[in-house]
Image (cartoon, rainbow, N blue to C red):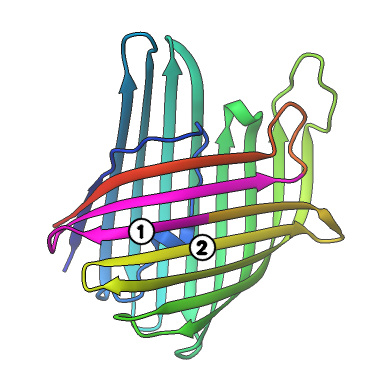
Amino acid sequence: MKKWLLFFLLSSSLSANAIVNIESMRSVDEAPGFHTQASLNINGKNGNSQKSNLETGLLFRWNHEASRQLLVMTYEYGETSDIKDTQNSFAHARHIQDINKLLAWEVFLQMESDEFKRLSLRALVGAGIRINLAVAADSYQSWLGLGVFRSKEELDEQVGVVDDLTEYATRANIYHGFKFPINDRSRIFNTLYYQPQIGDAQDYRLLEQLGLLFDITDTLSFKVSLDIKRDNEPPISVKKTDTSYNTGIEYRF
């Protein structure tokens, strides 16, 4: 039986750069079958300052008895005073195969672009293992991922900047996440990613997301999160750290 989920997220952000957390898109207690999620984020200001931002996304999950597949696609566009200052896209596909209740292996593909980070294309393929440190769906959940991926990045040229426009890298992919219930209606969640380049520990990427989810009704929830993303060796003219604060509502039916 198909189960359709529609999320309307009304968000405000300290940064125009969105952080995509794949772990937040998994579901360990979802029924077998095909599940779909759509998202639409719209922000705007008028008056002394004018700004508009639109983000759309689609998420598909296929759940089987011992395996799961996930496909997510997002696109974001924004303007300030009628001048474009945000444009990025993202696609990620993943297969997870259970070995037993505690261990699974996974493979994934990803493609993304971000005009205002000079990123015309990032494409990668990777694999790893996922360890369930706590598996009770109705209580504390914790997991650890260990893997590796190979990536290709193509940068846009910029006047006055001289750097490599194409870069290949092999990175470790280490992540840890947990969900902890505060009470029957609310829970805290956290995900941390660490991705150092193999052979060069100074070239690393870090992603941290901490948030709270409050159930207003059985189908309506309120969500708030703090996201921090760091690239310790970004392209020239790109800042190392992005921070964003997001609030929103989640509706399921």
Q: Is residue 199 left or right of residue 32?
A: right
Packing grade of label 2 (10 A; few <14, some 14-19, many >=20) is: many
User: Which secondary structure, mark 1?
Assistant: strand
Identified at 34% across, 47% down, the residue is 58
Q: Which residues are magenta?
A: 209-232
* Quarter occupied by the N terminus: bottom left
Q: Is residue 137 left or right of residue 171?
A: left
Q: Is residue 106 magenta?
A: no
Q: Earlier in the sequence, mark 2 or mark 1?
A: 2
Identify the residue position indicated by label 2 in the image. Answer: 191
Q: Which mark is residue 212?
A: 1
* Quarter occupied by the C terminus: bottom left
At label 1, the amino acid type is Leu
Figure check: 39 above or below 213: above
Identified at 43% across, 23% down, the residue is 78
Figure check: 205 above or below 118: below
Residue lying farthest front? 182
